[in-house]
């Protein structure tokens, strides 16, 4: 993978993780019950995807 692809991959990873932080903050402050748990689960999965993408950009 060339350096430009690594840069874009790491940028995508940062954006995904940023979106997941925004989503979990929104879920905890504005929602209740099942919707809150669902949004938190989606945010957790997004964080994992961002983490794996970040690892892929390092190697």
Image (spheres, rainbow, N blue to C red):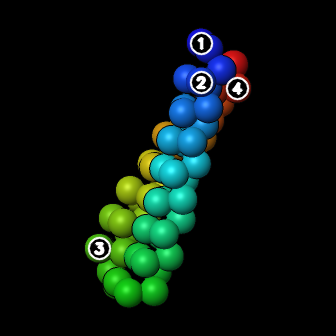
Query: Residue 35 location, x and y as percent?
Result: 29, 73
Q: Is residue 53 visible?
A: no
- Label 4: few (<14), some (14–19) or many (≥20) C-alpha neighbours in 10 Å: few
- Name the residue carrying label 1: 1
Q: Nearer the viewer, mark 4 or mark 2?
A: 2
User: Is 35 above or below relative to 58?
Assistant: below
For the C terminus, which image quadrant?
top right
- Whichever of labels 4 and 3 marks the residue nearer the N terminus, that label is 3
Q: What label does residue 4 carry, if any? A: 2
Q: CA distance from mark 4 to mark 2?
A: 12 Å
Q: What label does residue 35 carry, if any? A: 3
- Label 2: few (<14), some (14–19) or many (≥20) C-alpha neighbours in 10 Å: few
- Name the residue carrying label 4: 58
Residue sitting nearer the eye, 38 or 15:
15
Number of numbered discs visible in the structure rendering: 4
Residue at image point 51% right, 51% down:
15
**Within the image, what quadrant is residue 41 found in?**
bottom left
Q: Nearer the viewer, mark 1 or mark 2?
A: 2
User: Is 47 above or below relative to 8?
Assistant: below
- Label 3: few (<14), some (14–19) or many (≥20) C-alpha neighbours in 10 Å: few
Asked whether the residues under the numbered discs 3 and 1 touch, taking CB atoms below 8 Å apart as contact, a structural biologist would say no
Mark 1 falls on what kind of element? loop
For the N terminus, which image quadrant?
top right
Q: Nearer the viewer, mark 4 or mark 3?
A: 4
């Amino acid at each position: 993978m060339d350096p430009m692809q690594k840069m874009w991959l790491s940028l995508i990873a940062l954006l995904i993780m940023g979106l997941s932080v925004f989503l979990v903050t929104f879920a905890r402050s504005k929602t209740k019950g099942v919707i809150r748990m669902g949004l938190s689960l989606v945010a957790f999965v997004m964080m994992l995807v961002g983490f794996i993408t970040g690892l892929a950009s390092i190697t």
